Amino acid sequence: MAEEKKAKKIYTLEEIKFNRDNLTMAVLACIPLVGFILMFMEKKDLFVRYHATQFAFLNVVYIIWIIPFIGPILASLVGLLSLVLFVLGLLKTSKGERFDIPYLSGFALKVMSEIG
């Protein structure tokens, strides 16, 4: 008997639509630790899941860059950039707008597809 394989769902940015009922969850998803949890827990609302995935990985990038041997100036710049992206994400998400973090948005879509 042939084994049936289930294809992975590939998400696109066009599918990620704002749902006013989940505004609070979308804003909370921008908080990196909360985003990491929601990345795995949220299955229905792609807007929440997309933002959760992006901000979870933004936190990972930030942690990697603040390793002491890279230098305090570079670590400060990365920290400032992360803070700016965090604030922009909170503001845009609270208005119901999708916020795409450069270089992380495509990665976020792939991860969403992988974790189902």
Image (spheres, helix red, strand yellow):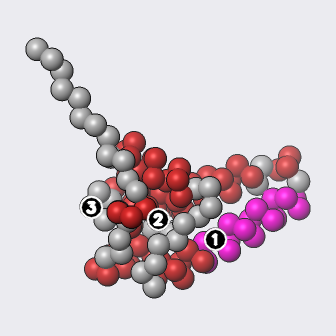
Outermost residue toward the left in this view = 1
Q: Which residue is mark 3?
A: 44
Distance of label 3 from label 2 (alpha carbons): 13 Å
Q: Quadrant of residue 66?
A: bottom right
- Rendered residue at 68%/57% (across/down): 62
Residue 87 x/y as whole percent: 61, 77
Outermost residue toward the bottom in this view = 95
Q: From the viewer's perspective, is 78 left or right of 94? A: right
Within 10 angstroms of label 3, few (less than 14), some, or many (20 or more) residues?
few
Q: Image height check: is 102 above or below 5? A: below
* Element at label 3: loop
Q: Image height check: is 34 above or below 110? A: below
- Residue kind at label 3, given as amino acid type: Lys
Q: Earlier in the sequence, mark 1 or mark 3?
A: 3
Residue 69 x/y as whole percent: 86, 46
- Residue kind at label 1, given as amino acid type: Leu
Residue 13 x/y as whole percent: 43, 62
The answer to if 44 sits in the magenta stretch is no
Tell which of 95 and 59 is nearer to you. 95
Tell which of 18 and 36 is nearer to you. 18
- Asked if one can make out residue 37 in the rendered structure from this viewpoint, the answer is no
The answer to if 84 sits in the magenta stretch is yes
Instruction: Tell me, for residue 51, which label it has, or none.
Output: 2
Secondary structure predominantly adopted by residues drawn in magenta: helix
Instruction: Tell me, for residue 85, which label it has, or none.
Output: 1
Q: Which residues are magenta?
A: 72-87
- Rendered residue at 46%/47% (across/down): 110
- Asked if one can make out residue 46 in the rendered structure from this viewpoint, the answer is yes
